[in-house]
Image (cartoon, helix red, strand yellow):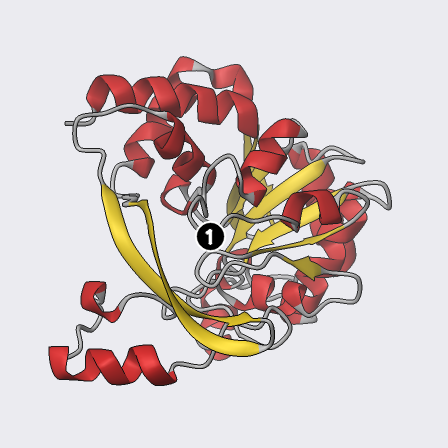
Amino acid sequence: MREADVVDAFPGVPQTVESLTRDLIELGVRPNSTLLVHSSLSALGWVCGGSEAVVMALIAAVGPAGTLVMPTHTSSLSEPEHWGDPPVPPSWWPTIRATMPAFDPRTTPSRAMGLIPETFRRWPGALRSYHPQVSFAARGPTASFIVERHSIRDGLGDESPLGRIYDLDGDVLLLGVGHGRNTSLHLAEVRSDYPSRAMEAQGAPILVEGERQWVAFETLAVDSDDFPRIGAAFEAAHPDAVRIGTVGRGSARVMRQRRLVDFGVEWMGANRE
């Protein structure tokens, strides 16, 4: 959404670092917590300072002893055979595998994550996990624990930042977005047993001892199409587990990740075909 469109869509006072911080605390963001954030800047109304102001508010809300985490995924660094948005001709696949620049956590931009996580990954003190497709950035006392040893074959499972957040009993904040963007449900996919569960051949360009290599690997084929249904079912079954409110002009939800993931494991086992 263009900035002018945001002004037209959300008339009234602008949002500020102070007002967003107040809204986050009133919503239920816990000081000193580990907080995984999924976000949409345009949903918050006109923010004075844009994505920078939102990051500042999030850091203030969790406090100096809290750790902030955001997805910084790079889906374009993947096996071109699976590309569908848009697909590319098979004759291009060898060239892509041979020449796609290798993932570098310092310089590779995130893709389709939005301005807030793209700003956050470059924030002073932020660390980024080394996964060419589903990296996460973290900042705070437990950032190293969260991002280190991110398994390339278990990118969204127990050997990923999602698994580390589960270990820390962290929270999930949906800031202007719905459960369709709730990546913690991918951890539930990894842990669940359902009939359609399948592995997928993947590949990505990475740096191995400073040299670019295309590395092939196998990982779980994930699917977020039913995440909105799972989120709705979770909220209906556990209304006490989700705090729902408004941050800026956008809807927001905060919840404990463990309860969501445990629910998702059971739901997928019972409902996925």
Q: Relative to 156, does residue 185 appear above or below in the rendering?
A: above
Which residue, given by chain and number where applicable, does mark 1 sit on? 152
Q: Residue at x 37, y 85 (%)?
A: 99
| Number of residues whose C-alpha sits closer than 10 Å to that of mark 1, classed few (under 14), some (14–19) or many (20 or more) | many
Mark count: 1
Q: Relative to 50, does residue 236 appear above or below in the rendering?
A: above
Q: Residue at x 49, y 78 (%)?
A: 212
Q: Relative to 221, does residue 1 appear above or below in the rendering?
A: below
User: Residue 13 placed where, x, y %?
Assistant: 65, 62
Residue 158 in sight in this render: yes
Extreme residue toward the front, this view = 209
Is 36 placed left or right of 271 in the picture?
A: right
User: Residue 175 placed where, x, y %?
Assistant: 54, 48
Between 48 and 138, the one lying in front of the other is: 138
Question: Image quarter for residue 46?
Answer: bottom right
User: Residue 187 placed where, x, y %?
Assistant: 44, 35
Q: Quadrant of the C terminus?
A: top left
Q: Secondary structure at mark 1?
A: loop
Is 131 placed left or right of 221 in the picture?
A: right
Is 163 placed left or right of 120 in the picture?
A: left
Q: Residue at x 64, y 65 (%)?
A: 121
Question: Could you tell me the amino acid type at mark 1?
Answer: Ile
